[in-house]
Amino acid sequence: MTATTTRVLTGITTSGTPHLGNYVGSIRPSVQASRNPHTQCFYFLADYHALVKIGDPARIQRSTLEIAATWLAAGLDPDKVFFYRQSDIPEIPELTWFLTCVTGKGALNRAHAYKAAVDKNTAAGHDTDADVTAGLFMYPVLMAADILMFKAHKIPVGRDQIQHIEMARDMAASFNHLYGDHLVLPEAVIEESVATLPGLDGRKMSKSYDNTIALFAPREHMRKQIAGIVTDSKAPGEPKEAEGSALFQIYQAFASQEETTSLREAYAHGISWGDAKQLLFERLDREIAPMREHYESLINEPARIETTLLRGAEKARDKSHELMTQLRKSVGLRALGQASAAPTKAPGKATLPSFKQYRDADGLFYFKLVEPQGTVLLQSLGFDSPRDAGRAIGQLQQLGSAALPGLQSRLRVLRDVSPEQIHLALTQLAT
Ligand code: TRP
């Protein structure tokens, strides 16, 4: 690792089966990024996030297995990255709480997903928070903890996630402002060259639209799904528009420049939709078939994936544990004898008044109480020995202004200093 190392982090929610859109938009580019020697990559299975949406334990477990196997089948080398399951990192929920305590509730009120839920309820005439869990409300904080835990610089995400990254930045800044410079402010990376894949119905391919093409469905199943992509009703021989054709866009996401150009020409020459679908199927199968084989062998050995994930978590926890140890101290969750490790807002030594002892030309021993900027608050008369002077200081430190009456005859009155100033200074110093 060099000083120029960029830490890249992204997570996939374990709520479903990976589809072509996940592969093109996230998995394929993240595997490519992991081969760059100047990046350190953190890729994880966001299973705590899945709990927000999915109340089906078997589905969460299955999805975790499928997404992990997909990443590995797509060529991710778990020894070269941090590859782990979110719920294997207990420091993440702990950091979530720390961040919760520096996050304005109002900021969470404005998060898109929560607001959409509220708007939907309002439109339907229901209570604004009907069926909204605190999990949905807190989703952005959990996500910020994922990111800030590993001091990630770059977060490759889809546009719908930009607000979450901005919220994570804000939380990091608030935390740092209060407790010192511990957290790194992350940035969203929207890869413009990475296509947003359309789904079967032409809208963005997404679980929530139920328009996906599974990445590793059996070969014949994929052929059937491709046959279901919507097209217009142009007959064979009629020229067809490449622009706005979902079929064309999916092809483009897998094909080379030349292949894309020749499909564009075929469209212009009136290729039938059936033939175009066959071309797409063949092109996809060429990239996917070898990975599918690998995927199937992985899926059939869940224990091996489990071991890989646990090893990844161990590696990640070296970092998460180290950061949380530092953060716990910084917020004040620390051993009672321990000195403050980080700058805090409490007055430090440099901002407190202090006692200065000295011997004057008359041979006697004196002390004064001086503010950091030089104002003298108390001035003693001469003591015969340094021990006597020290004893008087000790009384002032222990008893504060209560020691003043007993020491009256040993102190000189200073005109410009009020009793309140002296009282305050002694209270601050009292041990
Ligand atoms: N919220 C992301 C999604 O739905 C998944 C996610 C969870 C994530 N934690 C993250 C993405 C941290 C990037 C970084 O796609």
Image: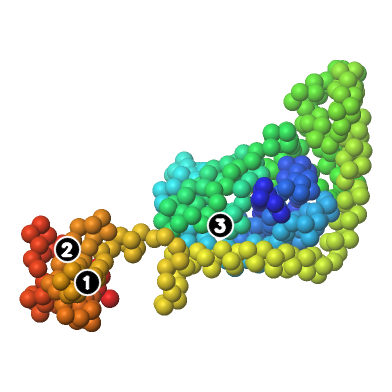
214 or 81, which lies in front?
A: 81
In depth, the one of 268 and 83 nearer the eye is: 83
Q: Is residue 343 above or below residue 127?
A: below
Lower sequence index among marks 2 and 3: 3
* Element at label 2: strand
Label 3 CA crowd tier, 10 Å (few <14, some 14–19, many 20+): many
Color theme of the render? rainbow
Amino acid carrying mark 3 in the image: Ala
Quadrant for the C terminus, please.
bottom left
Q: Nearer the viewer, mark 2 or mark 1?
A: 1
Residue 215 rendering spot, x and y as whole percentages: 81, 47
- The disc labelled 2 sits on which kind of residue? Leu
Instruction: Describe residue 81's horizontal placement relative to residue 426 as left or right.
Output: right
Q: Position of residue 138 (x, y in %)?
A: 50, 55
The residue under label 2 is 377
Query: At 25% from the left edge and 55% from the top edge, which residue is drawn?
Result: 373
Quarter of the image where the N terminus is located: bottom right
Separation of marks 2 and 1 at Cα, in angstroms: 18 Å
Say which residue label 1 marks: 359
